[in-house]
């Protein structure tokens, strides 16, 4: 395929179940919208958590096996290694079949190397800030809150994984950053800005429907309805949101609803912060669309993110994001969101009070969210991803500088 052709042939290597919660959902929607746009997408993944997007070809690496064999094979590190090997083999078997290779963390190194040997641009997704920064942020906040991070946490420090990801960073032709905060974490380490390509995630308008966002009637003046959606863990800053909520006048007449499963020990660490008549704890909610539509603001004072999907979803439903500057939210401060410096829960408190006391401002920001939803769809995100692929193909690959591989 020529350099300027409209449609690309993509090998999409995803070393986790495609369509699973979290990054599995991100990957599924990227693949789906790329295929809808006419690109030819071949996916290599460990297994399917939901049916494959229409118009794609898929190879699942993990077979169906009984008993303990499944558990052994499904160990994350082993599954990622198998997926990496299978993706690299697909490139070696038919290198002329692909224009670009899209890879994900810790299961990409052999795939990147195979692509590079055959002159194919390999891009590496950056779903979080630089892994060393992400590890440190999660560890520091867990220690500050008094929670011990278990090995099940995706942000628990793993020396071997960090070393592998550092090589992936260095050897990929380009790195895909979904937010400025992610890009900055690499630029601050001396990475070549030409290799850091911006794209964006999104929301599904078929699930988060405009008619549902518009159906909501204004609530009682001064009775602000706040919402938290996501895994309840120190890194997400729920303890900061609760401090701001309790200190705010909004807590006197409003409600704060928490939708998310708690990390081990975190609920106990929050203690009395959860014990207030205005706070509702619902646990994991599989479909939060109506919760967004029924609430005024989303609270997400994250310590570390890539680009939190809940901020796209909430904004699309008219639930105004009140987020930290580490959340990677696709918003404009003071227009369709309020942004506060990371850990500054006092500013978050002031923002809560401001919206609780100004119904006109809240309605204006809500309208700005809904009015801008079309730019936040997965289709728009996939168009930016495809543009990044083309930029990656135009780069002349060169080994990373020493400071990039540190």
Image (spheres, rainbow, N blue to C red):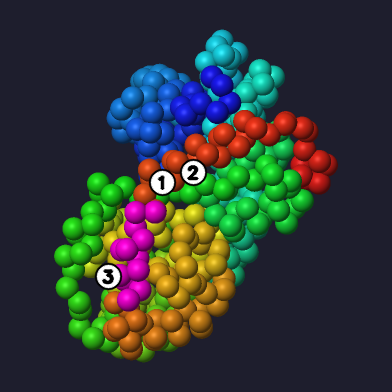
Q: Secondary structure at mark 3?
A: loop
Marks 1 and 2: CB-CB under 8 Å? yes
- For label 3, the crowd category at 10 Å Cα-Cα, with few meaning under 14, some 14 to 19 and many 20 or more, is many
Residue 75, label in figure: none
**Residue 205 location (% of width, % of height):** 28, 49
Q: Residue furthest front?
A: 4
**Nearest the eye: 128 or 120:** 120
| Residue 24: percent from left, percent from top | 42, 40
Identify the disc placed on residue 295.
3
Residue placed under numbered mark 2 in the picture? 384
Mark 3 to mark 2 CA distance (whole Å): 30 Å
Give how far apart the Cα atoms at labels 1 and 2 are: 7 Å
Q: Which residues are magenta?
A: 364-375
Residue 373 falls inside the magenta stretch: yes
Dot placed on the residue nearer the N-terminal end, 3 or 2: 3
- Prevailing secondary structure of the magenta residues: helix
Which mark is first along the chain, 3 or 1? Answer: 3
Q: Quadrant of the C terminus?
A: top right
Element marked by disc 2? helix
Residue 380 badge: 1
Q: Which quadrant is the N terminus positioned in? A: top right
- In screen coordinates, is 22 left or right of 107? left
């Amino acid at each position: 395929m020529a350099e300027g052709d409209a449609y690309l042939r993509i090998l999409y290597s995803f070393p986790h179940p495609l369509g699973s919660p979290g990054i599995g959902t991100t990957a599924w929607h990227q693949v789906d919208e790329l295929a809808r746009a006419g690109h030819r997408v071949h996916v290599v993944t460990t297994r399917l958590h939901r049916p494959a997007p229409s118009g794609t070809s898929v190879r699942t690496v993990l077979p169906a096996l009984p008993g303990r064999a499944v558990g052994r094979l499904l160990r994350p590190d082993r599954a990622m290694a198998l997926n990496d090997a299978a993706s690299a083999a697909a490139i070696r078997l038919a290198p002329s079949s692909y224009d670009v290779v899209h890879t994900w963390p810790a299961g990409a190194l052999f795939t990147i190397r195979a692509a590079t040997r055959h002159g194919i641009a390999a891009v590496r997704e950056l779903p979080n800030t630089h892994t060393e920064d992400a590890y440190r942020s999660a560890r520091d906040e867990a220690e500050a809150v008094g929670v011990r991070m278990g090995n099940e946490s995706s942000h628990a420090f793993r020396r071997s994984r960090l070393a592998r990801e550092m090589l992936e960073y260095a050897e990929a032709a380009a790195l895909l950053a979904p937010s400025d905060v992610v890009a900055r974490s690499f630029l601050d380490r001396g990475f070549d800005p030409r290799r850091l390509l911006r794209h964006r995630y999104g929301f599904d308008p078929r699930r988060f429907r405009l008619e549902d966002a518009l159906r909501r009637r204004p609530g009682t003046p001064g009775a602000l309805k706040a919402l938290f959606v996501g895994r309840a863990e120190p890194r997400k800053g729920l303890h900061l949101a609760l401090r701001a909520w309790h200190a705010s006048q909004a807590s006197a007449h409003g409600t704060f609803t928490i939708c998310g499963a708690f990390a081990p020990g975190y609920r106990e660490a929050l203690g009395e912060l959860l014990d207030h008549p205005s706070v509702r704890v619902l646990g994991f909610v599989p479909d939060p669309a109506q919760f967004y539509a029924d609430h005024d603001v989303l609270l997400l004072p994250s310590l570390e993110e890539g680009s939190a999907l809940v901020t796209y979803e909430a904004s699309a439903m008219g639930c105004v994001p009140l987020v930290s500057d580490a959340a990677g939210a696709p918003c404009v401060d003071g227009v369709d969101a309020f942004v506060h410096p990371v850990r500054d829960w006092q500013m978050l408190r002031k923002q809560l009070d401001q919206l609780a006391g100004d119904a006109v401002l809240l309605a204006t920001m809500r309208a700005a969210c809904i009015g801008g939803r079309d730019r936040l769809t997965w289709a728009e995100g996939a168009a930016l991803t495809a543009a990044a692929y083309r930029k990656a193909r135009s780069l002349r690959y060169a080994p990373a500088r020493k400071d990039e591989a540190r």
